[in-house]
Amino acid sequence: MPVDAQGGDDLNDAFYYLDCLAKDASIQNLNHDEFYYIEEHMLRFFMRLQGCEHMTKFLHNENYTKLEIALEIWRTSPPNMIQALIRANIPKWAL
């Protein structure tokens, strides 16, 4: 069952907290991967959870930090996730 399907977790919270870390790192000129490092296995877990496996190509791309990848994963809500949330929370609107 997708995150937030039963109203317990909030995708916006995950995005918000990661965004705060990214903004803080930029303000303080901190290296994202040194101060806010996220393990690759967690990024892969986030991708599976969000249905964003296509994003694995960014894992070893030096143009993106692990924090930026995590932020993008949680910012992205694939259509199947949105449909699952609607079915779980507003059944009469389900497609």
Image: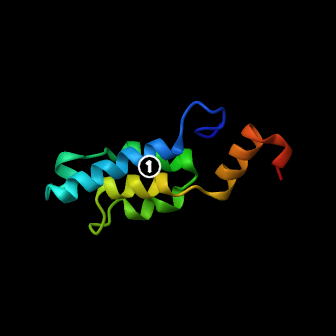
Residue 45 visible, this orientation:
no
Q: How is the image coloured?
A: rainbow
Q: Residue furthest left?
A: 29
Looking at the rendered structure, the secondary structure element under dot 1 is helix
- Classify 90 as above or below 6: below
Looking at the picture, tell me which residue is in the foreground, 5 or 46: 5
Residue 15 lies, in percent from the top left, at: 44, 49
Residue 70 lies, in percent from the top left, at: 39, 52
Residue 27 sits in which quadrant?
Answer: bottom left
Residue 8 sits in which quadrant?
Answer: top right
Looking at the picture, tell me which residue is in the foreground, 17 or 46: 17
Left or right, 44 with reference to 68: right
Mark 1, residue position = 15
Residue 69 sits in which quadrant?
Answer: bottom left
The N terminus appears in which quarter of the rendering? top right
Residue 48 lies, in percent from the top left, at: 53, 47
Looking at the picture, tell me which residue is in the foreground, 89 or 46: 89
Residue 82 lies, in percent from the top left, at: 67, 51
Q: Residue at x 48, y 56 (%)?
A: 75
Q: Residue at x 43, y 58 (%)?
A: 72
Residue 20 visible, this orientation:
yes
Q: Residue at x 55, y 44 (%)?
A: 49
